Image: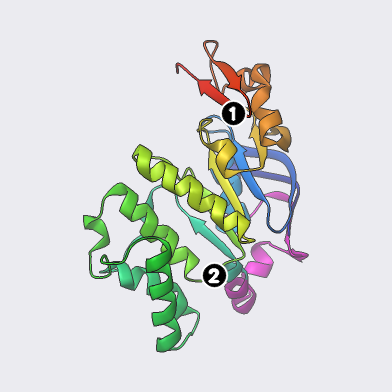
Amino acid sequence: MIELSNVAYAYEGDFTALRDITLKIGAGESVALLGSNGCGKSTLLKIICGVLTADSGHYRFNGDEISKKTLADASFSKAFHRKVGFVFQNSETQLFCATVADEIAFGPRQMGLSDAQVAERVADCLELLGLNGFECRAPHRLSGGEKKKTAIAAVLAMNPDVLVLDEPMNGLDPRTERWLAGFLKDLTNAGKTVITSTHDLELVREISARAALFDENHTLAADGETATVLADVELLRRVNLVDKFYHKHGTGDHTHFHTHN
């Protein structure tokens, strides 16, 4: 579904964010992008979503080239953005409507769905995200977890093939973190492609079967099964994802991580 070949990107032409990234993601996969802050995870997510376009290299989605030229075609761009939904790290940046119901309805309305279809999608997403009773609440008055749920609901209302989340656990309380981890797993089990950027080693195994690890040179240092990547402690240290005090211990099929950053 997603094919990136030798992709590079630099902000303002000077500040390198990505170097020579080659990555393939199939339909229905759950993939976590791991790495320290500033390694390029968020930039790659924005390229996958079409928010940014690569300076060099190629990005193909379902065989179609995604570039400035193709995204300049309004009909192509609209069809592409329906298929890939992006949940920003800071939910407040994508919540702008007067009520939670309006937030969820916005995307389906832009898609040209009928009022009845929009109402059905809003009801389904309110139920799915546990937001019943919040329909008339103003998003800016919600808690951090409620804002995150509303942002996810607004994206899922458009029924994208791919859900992309940038550091989704940031700012959430432990209960909401556990709920979100289970929810992302349920989406994958339902056939959605889920791509998440994170540096949370406690939860990454739960939300992804595969991990792509970035180093501080903005390149890919590893790409494989999540458990295998997390087991390579020396590699995690080398890419500055954990420090020298990091250790892990396993019991049965469970591995627990401890960091002192």
Which residue ends up furthest to the front in the rendered image? 252
Residues at marks 2 and 1, CA–CA distance in whole angstroms: 33 Å
The answer to whether residue 92 is visible is no
Q: Is residue 61 covered in magenta? A: yes
Q: Residue type at mark 2: give it.
A: Asn
Which residue ends up furthest to the top in the rendered image? 245
**What residue is drawn where x is 23% and y is 63%?**
138
Residue under numbered circle 2: 159
Residue 94, percent from left and from top: 39, 59
**What residue is drawn where x is 43% and y is 42%?**
178
Give the vertical position of 43 relative to 117 (above or below): above
CB atoms at circles 2 and 1 under 8 Å apart? no
Residue 62, percent from left and from top: 74, 65
The answer to whether residue 55 is visible is yes
Compare residues 174 and 96 and report the one nearer the observer: 174
Residue under numbered circle 1: 254
Which type of secondary structure does the marked residue at label 2 adopt? loop
- Does 47 sit left or right of 125 as displayed? right
Magenta region, residue range:
52-79
Q: Residues within 10 Å of mark 2 (few under 14, many from 20)?
A: some
Give the vertical position of 176 relative to 124 (above or below): above
Q: Residue type at mark 1: give it.
A: His
Quarter the C terminus occupies: top left
**What residue is drawn where x is 38% and y is 74%?**
123
- Does 96 sit left or right of 228 as displayed? left
Looking at marks 2 and 1 on the same chain, the residue that comes earlier in the sequence is marked by 2
Residue 91, percent from left and from top: 37, 52
**What residue is drawn where x is 67% and y is 24%?**
231
Foreground tag (2 vs 1)? 1
Q: Is residue 233 covered in magenta? A: no
Q: What label does residue 1 carry, if any? A: none
- Does 112 sit left or right of 15 as displayed? left
